Image (spheres, rainbow, N blue to C red):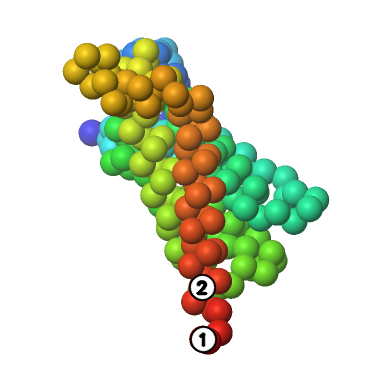
Amino acid sequence: MARPAKPLISRTAAVAAALTIIDDDGLDAFSLPKLAQRLGVATPSLYHHFSDRTELLSEVTRSIVNETRVPRQPADGNWQDWIVRYALNFRDVVLRHPNAAPAMLQFLPRDLVTDMWERAATYLVESGVPVRLHVQILDGLEKLTLGVALTEAVRPAPQRAKVFAKVDKDAHPTLYSAMRSNRLTPRQLHEQMMRSFLHGVLHDNQVQDAPDD
């Protein structure tokens, strides 16, 4: 399709409007004609900036990841607190745009996510964490964070605050009892999951480094 001679909108405005449509109406409702209507332009105007819907959705996912805030480094040098906070900030961003979760799965901007983990790896070096543990730590936290966040995001809104959905007192008595005993929110469970993972990595490292009797 031929592109108009002069762009009528900016790339940034188009991405922001696309994300708003997805947030409000869902990914299935998003289309280039609908975006053009929202921006008050003809659909061909979008082709100044994007070759197709796929490229536009890729930019939408980049804009979501770019919302992730880098936490301030703790004064006490507790790198575990910092890296867990960083992962939780990423989780919060994904869940801020749950309707975009399918696009995140398909068009995750790996370069931006890698930039995030490069910052984390640099801080691990500065904190004295053995380099041989970095990949294990970062890969594990990424899988935990993306898996938990995207799984939660694709659930119906009323169920996102629940750990397990559709638990029946009579059909699932043991799980029902466990649910009633749980006092942690899904976010707190995710945090505890990451801390337990880090504890396990460090414990195994200490065992490996321990001298043989």
| Residue in view at x 47 percent, y 53 percent | 197
- Which residue is most to the left? 171
Relative to 7, is 111 above or below?
below
- Residue 5 vs 145, above or below: the answer is above
| Image position, residue 158 (x, y; %) | 37, 13
N-terminal-most mark, 2 or 1: 2
Q: Which residue is mark 1?
A: 212
- Describe the element under mark 2 as helix, strand or loop: helix
The amino acid beneath tag 2 is Val
Front residue of 155/210: it is 210
Q: Position of residue 109 (x, y in %)?
A: 41, 47
Going 59% across and 57% down the picture, which residue do you hit?
A: 120
Q: Quadrant of the N terminus?
A: top left
Task: Please determine whether, in this image, residue 20 is positioned above or below residue 68.
Answer: above
Q: Which residue is mark 2?
A: 207
Q: CA distance from mark 2 to mark 1?
A: 10 Å
Which residue lies at the image location 30% right of the left edge and 26% below the top edge? Answer: 175
Q: Which mark is residue 175?
A: none
Q: Is residue 26 visible?
A: no
* Three-letter residue code for mark 1: Asp
Camera-nearest residue between 80 and 154: 80
